[in-house]
Amino acid sequence: MVKIEILMQEGKVRRIGELELDRYLNFFEHSSQDNFNHSQAVMEAFPRWSIISGYYAMHDRTKLFIAKQFRLKIEMEVHSTTIKVLQEVLQDKELLNLMEKGYEEFITMANDLAEAKKERVKSQYYTGTTFMEQEYRKRAQAFLSEIVQPFLAKLNFLLGEKS
């Protein structure tokens, strides 16, 4: 795993300043919810955008979690860096004890985000055939219910919010 200090030295992560913090948190709070709502709203008509929006709901909520809990802002290579930071902070034994959950559940959550990124990339560039649209509609429904919603519920729990 990559240490956060190394990511900071590389300029991929930095501490959020006091003046920026509220605006940053507010943005990701709303962006995550908007993406989640969009994912649900377009599932039938535009399933590939449902997957993309679902992934971004997860991604933005993760950045909110990282900012709220650790005052860190992802600056470069935002998708892979966000996953690396999440994996790093969820391995912190002290943090895990505070969260009252098992180590494996949190590692699974980080892996879910990594898998979601792969799914988002694949769905963003599909060809648009009738068969693929039907396939992506099924995949979008499963993605939302099996990955996005459980992931967001876990992060909301960590943030002390209702699911």
Image (tube, rainbow, N blue to C red):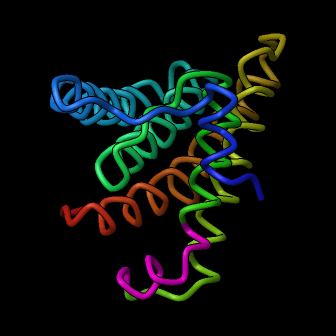
Residue at x 33% of width, y 67% of height = 158
**Residue situated in front as seen by the camera: 161 or 96:** 96
Residue at x 76% of width, y 26% of height = 121
Image: 56 above or below 72: above
Magenta-colored stretch includes residue 91: yes
Query: x and y percent of residue 114 in the render?
Result: 71, 48
Dominant SS of magenta comes to helix
**Residue situated in front as seen by the camera: 93 or 115:** 93
Report the quarter where the C terminus lies: bottom left
Residue at x 33% of width, y 56% of height = 69
How many numbered markers are drawn? 0
Query: x and y percent of residue 29 in the render?
Result: 25, 36
Report the quarter where the N terminus lies: bottom right
23 to the left or right of 154: left
Answer with the quarter of the image where residue 116 lies: top right
**What residue span does the magenta drawing correspond to?**
90-99
Magenta-colored stretch includes residue 114: no
**Residue situated in front as seen by the camera: 71 or 5:** 5
